[in-house]
Amino acid sequence: YYIEAPKGESVLTPEGYQALVNLKRTIEAHPNIHKTLSIVDVINPLHKASNPKGAGPPKDSKSLSKYLHSFNAAGGEGIEKLIDKDHRTARILAQAKHEGFVAASETGNTLRREGQALLPVGSTLEVTGFVYLLGDWIRDVFHGCVDGLLFAFLTTLFMLVFGMRLKLAGLAAMIPNAVPIVFMIGALCWMYDHFDPESMFVGMIAIGIAVD
């Protein structure tokens, strides 16, 4: 999850940092997320160590930058993976619990909508990662297959009813065309949790055979 502050601003302001904290909690609270890693995991332990009695969250940008400087001075590595050198873009790494590309894509889209509302005005939130992007692509392909299947069915019906002027016969002829598709969908719903693009390809082949 990439969080970008408005041009010329920083995510390491009291408001921006608190938004990162809230966003991290929101992501971790999702049932499909196992754990996260962000700049919050670097700053919070340093802040607590500097304020053992509990002084609340960091109150200014200078304190936040000081913690990052202390981390680097102590030999800390990998901070560039969590925040850029200009402190305008931060990143939250999330590990999902579930299996499946489409499920990861749906989780990412849900958290993007929820997380955007937590950020300061002008900030943006983007979801990236191979699993998320591939899941998004698979979902688009699946929806395209569904649209193609409906289009093929309706086009065949139109040709029979209006092109060949066989109203009742055309409607009756579509029943055996629909049977293999309905049977396939029913069987998949019974055996699996959800569909995939390959399943819809079978449906398009089935209606092609039925029309022939």
Image (tube, helix red, strand yellow):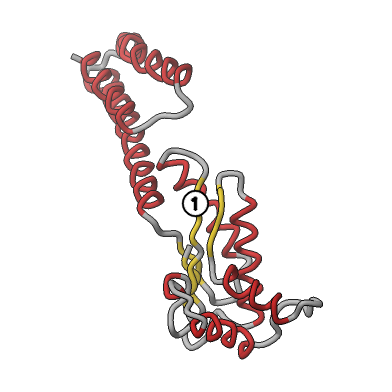
Residue 204: quadrant of the picture: top left
- Tell which residue pokes out farthest to the bottom in this image: 62
Residue 172: quadrant of the picture: top left
Looking at the image, residue 193 sits to the left or right of residue 133; the answer is right
Q: Is residue 1 visible?
A: yes
Q: Position of residue 26 (x, y in %)?
A: 63, 57
- Tell which residue pokes out farthest to the left in this image: 212
- Compared to residue 78, the image places residue 181 above or below, namely above
Front residue of 13 and 155: 13
Q: Position of residue 186 (x, y in %)?
A: 44, 16
- The amino acid type, in three-letter code, at marker 1 is Gln
- Tell which residue pokes out farthest to the right in this image: 53
Looking at the image, residue 20 sits to the left or right of residue 81; the answer is right
Front residue of 176 and 68: 68
- Residue linked to disc 1: 95
Residue, x 40% and y 29% (percent of image)? 195
Residue, x 63% and y 71% (percent of image)? 19
Front residue of 83 and 16: 83
- Compared to residue 11, the image places residue 172 above or below, namely above
Q: Is residue 158 visible?
A: no
Split into 4 quadrants, where in the image is the C terminus?
Answer: top left
Q: Residues within 10 Å of mark 1 (few under 14, many from 20)?
A: few
User: How many numbered markers are drawn?
Assistant: 1
Residue, x 43% and y 72% (percent of image)? 78
Residue, x 56% and y 49% (percent of image)? 33
Looking at the image, residue 39 sits to the left or right of residue 21; the answer is left
Q: Position of residue 211 (x, y in %)?
A: 22, 16
Q: Position of residue 140 (x, y in %)?
A: 35, 44
Front residue of 171 and 55: 55
